Amino acid sequence: MRWEAQTLQVDHEQLDIADGDTPSGGVQHPMVDLELSSPTPEFAHTEFHEVITKSALNKVPEASNMPFRWSINPYRGCTHACVYCYARGTHEYLDFNYGEDFDRQIVVKVNIVDALRQELKRGKWDGQTVALGTNTDPYQRAEGRYQLMPGLLAELGKAGAPVSLLTKGTLLSRDIPLLQSLAPEIPLDIGVSLAMIDPQLTEIFEPGTPSPSARLKLIEKLSSAGANVSIMAMPIIPWLTDSINAMEQLFSSVASAGATSIQTTPLFLRPGSREWFMSFIQSQYPHLLAGFQSMYSGRIYAPARYANKLRAKTRQLAHQHGLGIGAVHESEKDPDVHFRTHLPIRPVNSRPTTTQTPGTNQQALF
């Protein structure tokens, strides 16, 4: 692994991660010396690599079109194992592969709460939004074992940092009381990632994620607790999840569960993700391979014509179901209120049942 060049400063009393500063009595260690590989029987075929991180806060380049300037990723790799995940290529930086290693070789930054505390104390953060859930899901199954998120949220709350949180993980429900306690103090954007309602398709493309019905229940819990829940419907996969019926079912389901806004994004394929996704399509949906190869030939993103039609359909369905348009931070419906701390707990609408995978006789978006 390419961790040998990284160093950290260790003191018997506390961890000081200031770059270039070794505290009195501290020593420098190569990262590789501090890695602990931890196979666990309860996580079949998964290995955790416990590391000491030098930094918790990642600065997002100013040139980026991301609506946040800081991110935190307590894990690298993700047991959700989503076939299309855009972050797969980043696992190669650690000398892992973008395929099964991304799903099974999980790097855990076991000291990340302490690292964040030190960075906030030193004034590294400049007051802008901190996003959790960018290159990895912070509430993947590993979080149940390591429980890093409560500490991270608490430290960000103490600093008054606006937080944007996106997850597929239903473990987020564990931290709802903590989020409620933080809501009066800091802006909180809560997003649930849900792009397909059909349980069979979900099992195929997102084999390690909670079921769609479980995520709908999470939305209900968050809404009942006072959260304005944004839905990140990403990616919408051509020929598989972009039919009129599939999208109607998605919008209807999340609206009934209590979501307040939604953002759809077409499938995009970065290096690493492209190779893994195309190989998967060749194996599971060979009749669609030529279409995907043509659509994404020489490009990462879907053609503008496709994206524009999807955007128009999104606006139509969102209006129909009373949903705002926007990503986790960018709801057009209610941009200034993220957690309804002033409202009492209210009853939650019943959740509609799921149906089978859309058939070939259903109307497609294109």
Image (tube, helix red, strand yellow):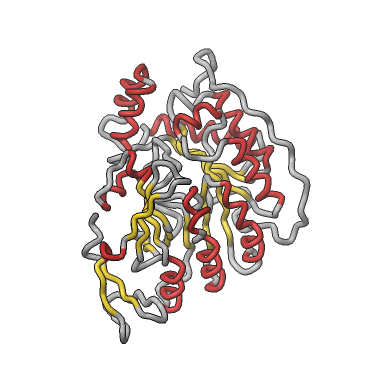
Measured from the top left, where is residue 61 in percent x and y? 34, 60
The reply, left or right, for residue 20 in relation to residue 112 is left
Q: Nearer the viewer, residue 179 or 320?
A: 179
- Which residue occupies 52% across, 24% down? 243
Relative to 291, say whether 16 is above or below. below
Give the residue at the far bottom of this rendering. Answer: 24
Give the residue at the far top of this rendering. Answer: 361
Relative to 329, say whether 79 is above or below. above
Relative to 271, say whether 290 is above or below. above
Residue 286 image-quadrant placement: top left
Q: Nearer the viewer, residue 354 or 144?
A: 144
Measured from the top left, where is residue 361 in percent x and y? 53, 13
- Which residue occupies 52% across, 55% down? 165
Measured from the top left, where is residue 334 in percent x and y? 63, 52
Q: Nearer the viewer, residue 50 or 273?
A: 50
- Which residue occupies 31% across, 48% down? 91
